[in-house]
Each structure stands twice: as structure tokens, then as C-alpha cells.
Amino acid sequence: MTISRGPQAFPRIEYLRRLAAVKSEMARRDIDVLFVSDASNITYLTGYTAASAYVPQGLIVTIQEEEPSFILRRMDAPAAIHQTFLDRNKIISYPEGLVGNPDKDGYDVVIDFLNEAGFAKRSIGLEMKNLPAQSAAKFKSRLPSTKIVDCTNAVTWLRLVKSDLEIAVMREAAAISDAAIMRAAEVIRPGVREADAIAEIAATLARGVNGKVGTRIVNINLCSSPRTGTAHINWTEDVFREGSQINIELGGVRHSYCAGIMRTFSIGAPSDRLRRLHDAEVAGLEAALDAARPGSTCSDVANAFYRTLQKHGFQKESRCGYAHGIGWMEPTASLRDGDMTELKPNMTFHLMLGNWVDEDFGYVLSETIRITEKGVADVLTSAPRKLFEIG
Amino acid sequence: MTISRGPQAFPRIEYLRRLAAVKSEMARRDIDVLFVSDASNITYLTGYTAASAYVPQGLIVTIQEEEPSFILRRMDAPAAIHQTFLDRNKIISYPEGLVGNPDKDGYDVVIDFLNEAGFAKRSIGLEMKNLPAQSAAKFKSRLPSTKIVDCTNAVTWLRLVKSDLEIAVMREAAAISDAAIMRAAEVIRPGVREADAIAEIAATLARGVNGKVGTRIVNINLCSSPRTGTAHINWTEDVFREGSQINIELGGVRHSYCAGIMRTFSIGAPSDRLRRLHDAEVAGLEAALDAARPGSTCSDVANAFYRTLQKHGFQKESRCGYAHGIGWMEPTASLRDGDMTELKPNMTFHLMLGNWVDEDFGYVLSETIRITEKGVADVLTSAPRKLFEIG
């Protein structure tokens, strides 16, 4: 029995638009074939979101063919037929005997496919930052006459400017992020275990809002006193206490598109230092939003923030954010000093102003933003931009 | 201000035991230095569980020094001081300016460290299956006089046999898995949205049981009619219906140790085919548990299952499981035909009998198991081994 195509997050024409941009980039780089193995890039080009990236899989994109071929494990082929816009004959599954097999794996099937399709003497692009070194070596040894070109982030850069359809999905994700922050404000109380607060926050991320469910629960970071100087601890077995500070980073997800948000909570009155840092960061955020205009650079945005923060007597060492979308961080543009990426309408960023000042003291604030046609950035997340005081 | 060491999942002596085994393996391979970049291996050797593996980081293990050096991003150093057993002078952080920097990254700092420590002309082990091809190339070009040896899974194989302390933690994780399955049985009802059931299941995974909270929420797969032939779909925007079948895979987590479990649910009476497949799989599971004794091989276990299933008129193409622990799958031993890994006491596996028979029909059943001193395997998960009938 066959499985039918399921509801699609985007119409076929949207995927064809994305693929056309990839093919233009391939032509520019003089590549005949591109092997796309990064899981978020696969999602971008097909709509596939099943969690199977722990085994070899990827798309073969050629200039000639409208749709790519998707080579993946047999167990996952039905999900690809169901989730993607691809014609089912474009989904090529390899036998389960290649999983956990020390002699041969799914990359051998990809290489066989390239050989049989007559690409062995052509130029093939690989995502070398994503591909394990062992597997890249296999491509080189089994395709000795092929010109292998590092195409790391070739597709990823194309994801930076979103379509209006993608922005609409990110707004849905951002509404979930807001709801989860508001739920955190309801459940963080002295004596409550961190894990019990996380239970409520995670449930909100799944239920979603406005009839739009969360389609994945991604990492939630909850760093509470005495851990507010840490950035990426999920949570602990501890309870909240009178006087605790709590830093939260989370994001709703719709169809793999994430919308990050960070807020800081204080049980009882915040310290004077925390309040001053919060005021400085909010001022910095407003300066960054004002600087985040088409034609400016990522570096401009970061420096607008850094300058404002310094005026308030604080500093931040880390970058101020990164390109944001499918799978959370897009490893391309960074809001950092020296990143000369020019801002364009519908680029989206996680404007991440988390500031870990001391080993034992940090503060977090962030928004998911969109560059507009002209003027200041559009903020997709909309939970109150305040230091949440509990009790 | 400094951050103090937090509660530790394991005593120092446990980490030193693990490191001693790594150093023996290094001596056997004639390696002077091992760079451990796999996130689960870092957790294993130090107790670090913060979610920072998206940037370069890793341990430098040498034969001479008792504790490894942990090189990571400055933002994450406080978490390393707080979470790991390492002396704080063993935690070496690199500047934030190397994050999102196209010219230089954290691996350059690792290479500088190796050079300055006088290892440039020695033999250095790298985990080539984990390291991106781009980064492996950097090690080779910047360490031209070094003998670089692929040590993929050298540490990972040592994780296969657990200590009694690790088994105790996996039992705690398994109890959470059981509770999440029982919660699923309470909330799966006709008309309920999949995402609302997931909200309750995820909350249970966070709250934990018996005073032991879940320390992470990992992927939950919920594949319902008409998607029971798929394996790795998180969940959809759909509602459960009268007559729906629901396949669930999930796992509780304690200190990054996972305990996977799969169960199948039917709203209303299951079809005859589903009931026959369930009976066959339970019989196969019992045969596999009986075969999973010290001295047998992974292949023996898989074939005991396959034989029993065939007697009942069914087949399964995929492997019957894999080594299981930190971060879910350990990419070493597989319960598959031809894997001659000999079973030893306290090896742990996810005995994964999910069987995707047709594109539109599959069934799931799994347990987390431990190889005992003698006799049949010990099953850590203990939710009823039944086809859950709802309503």
C-alpha cells in the first residue's frame, strides 16, 4: 500500500523558486551537481522534517532536472513521500543493511548514483563543513576523476532572505515563543522545581497558539542563580528561591522555522546592577533595531548596540546575533563587528543580546527580527520587553 | 566573581576510571594526544552537558596528565566550571571573536594549544567521523609534521559497557520513559490534537518520576494513521480519530543518559493484521532477550528475533537496535545480522523492534535492555508490553 502526500507547509512553486536560486548559484560556481546533506538545507528545498539526519542522506541537485533526487534510508522513504513536494520517483531509498554497517553506508549509494548518472567526470559540490571528514574522504577516493568543489553554505546563504510565505510561518513561531515566555512568568515561583516550570513551558511550545501548534520542541535553556553566568545549560534539578534570577532562552517552531526569544526573570526585586544592565540592554536593543535597515551591514547593527551599551557603562564580548530560521541558527551572517553582510528586506535574525558579564552573573534579552523594506527592523516576537519581576 | 562547582552526576573516581580506559586505548594505538570533539564523548569524560556543540570545542587528552584540558568558547566556560569534575585551570576558553568568524575559529585555538604544548611532531588522534571535513583539513594543513590518526569511536566503544553507577542513572531515565508512555495512554483520545498529547508527554519527560526530574527533552516521534509506515516524524497538526493507530518512540533522560521505549496504540479495536504483528513482535522480543546473554553476539540477538518473527509470518528489514546511553544512539555495536560484537555484562542497548512493513503500515515496540552477568537480558523499561487499546 502506498502513502499519500500530506499537507504541505509551502506550495510547490515556493520550492521551485528556492531550487531555481540554488541552480543559479551552481551555474555561477560552475558546478554540475550539488549534493546537499545539511539537514536544514534539505528541509528548505523539499519540506522534509523527519528526524533522520543521524544516518547519511541528501539531495542530488542538477541544473537540468526540475526536482532533485532525495537519497535516504529505506525506513525514512515513506516520510519523504508524505512530507515533501517531490515526485515519488525522485525518492531513492537505500537498504537497511547499510545502517550500522562498518564497510559501506548511504554515502556509497550517493556515490554509486553519481557514477551511474554519468557525473563522475564532472564537477560536484559538497557541503564540506557539514560532511564528516571520513565521508568526504570516501567521495574523493571513490570519485577520482571528479572535480570536487567545497560548496559549504552555498544553499545556506540563500536561506538568509525569506519569502513572505516564510515570514508568515516565522510569525506563527514567534507567537508561540511569546506564549511560552508568558507561561514561564506564570509558573516561576519560589519553591517550584526548574523541571516543573520547564514542563509547562515545553507543553506551551507543543500546544502553540491561535490554532497553530508547535511542530517541534527545541532546546530550552534555563540558567538560574547561581548559574546566570552560563549560557547553554538546559535546566537543573534545583528549585527556584526567593531572590533567584532566571535567564531563559527558547523558541517556538513551525515547520522547522524557529523564532528565538530570551527574557530575564527575578524573584523579588532585582539588584541595582541587574536593573542597570537591563536598562542598558533595552536601550542597546532599540539602537540595534534602528540600525537594522536595508543597506546597512551586520557590523553596523552590532556596533550600534555595543556603542549604546558602553554609554551605559557595560560591555558585551559575544556577537549580537545571527541569521535565523530553519533549525535555529543559520551559520552564515552574524551580527558582529566586521561582518560586512549587507542587510536586505526579509532577512531574519535572532538579535541575541545575552550578556554573560561574570562567571556568576549574566543577563539575557533577545528578539527575532526581520529587516523591512525601509526603516527600522520589524520585531516578530512581542512578549513584554521587560525584566520580569515575580512576586 | 567565580562560579562554584555544582552537584555532580558521578564522583570524580568514575571519571578517572573512564579516562584511564581512554589512555589505555591511546597507548594501544600509539597515540600521544587524543582530541575528543564528539559531544557525547565530552559528556562521558567530564560531565559537561551544556548545549554548545554547535561551535568548535573539545578535550585534549594526554597519557601524562590526569585530567584533560577542555577547550571551548568563552561564553560556555562557566558552565564547564560548574558542571564538570575538571580543575578550573583545565578549562581553556577562546575569545568570542572566533565565533561566526570566517577566517579563524575554535579549532585554530586547539591547534595552537597542541603546537605550544609541543605535540606538533607527535601522533594525534582525531575523531574523523565527527569532525567536519573542512576542520580536519585545517588540522592537516596547520600540523604538517604531525602524524594524524583517525580515532573515530575510540572513546565511543568504551562507553558500550556501563558502570553500575551509569546503570543506576539509566534506570532513572527508564522510569521516566515508562511514565511518559502511561501518560500517552491517558491523553490519546479521538478528537485530541497530536500536539496536545505531545504537550502532556513532554511535560512528563521534564517532571520525571520518584523525585528524579528529566534533565532534557529529546525527540519524540509520534507517527499516527495514515503515517504508521513512517519512523521519524515528530508529530503533525492532525487530530486522533476513531480507528487511528499511533506509534510512539520516546525516552526519558537523566544526565544525558537516554532510555528509549516504543509502544503502539490503537483507538478502537486493532485490525487483525496489527494484532498478529504485535503477537509476533512480542514473541520475537522474548526470543531476543533470551539470546542476549554474555558471550553471545549482537548478530545472535538479531537473528533470534528475525527467526521468531518469520515463524509468525512477518519480516523486518532494519536492524533490531543499537548501543544506547548518552545522547541516545552510540554509533558502535548494532543488533544486526553480521555484527560479531560479543555481549558483555552491563552493555546497554535500545532493543528497537519497530517494523515498517508497508509505506502505510508499521508497528513499534522497543525496550532499553542491559546484558546481565549470566542469563537473559535485564529490561530497564517496564511499561506494559502490550498493544494499547484506547476506548
Image (cartoon, coloured by chain):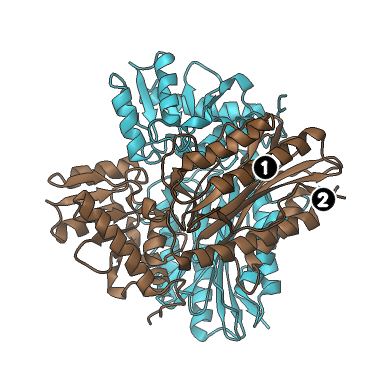
Chain colours: A brown, B cyan
Callout 1 amino acid:
Ala
Frontmost residue, A114 versus A36: A36
- Residue count near mark 1 (Cα–Cα under 10 Å), binned few <14, some 14–19, many ≥20: some
Q: Is residue B371 among what the camera can see?
A: no
The residue at the point 56 percent across, 77 percent down is B238
Frontmost residue, A361 versus B199: A361
* Quarter holding residue B360: bottom left
Label ID, residue A283: 1
Q: CA distance from mark 2 to mark 1?
A: 32 Å
Disc 2: which residue? A192
Callout 2 amino acid:
Val
Vertical relation: A319 (above or below) B23: below
Where residue B324 appears, as percent x and y from the top left, is 52, 49
Vertical relation: B78 (above or below) B53: above
Nearer the N terminus, badge 2 or badge 1?
2
Label ID, residue A102: none
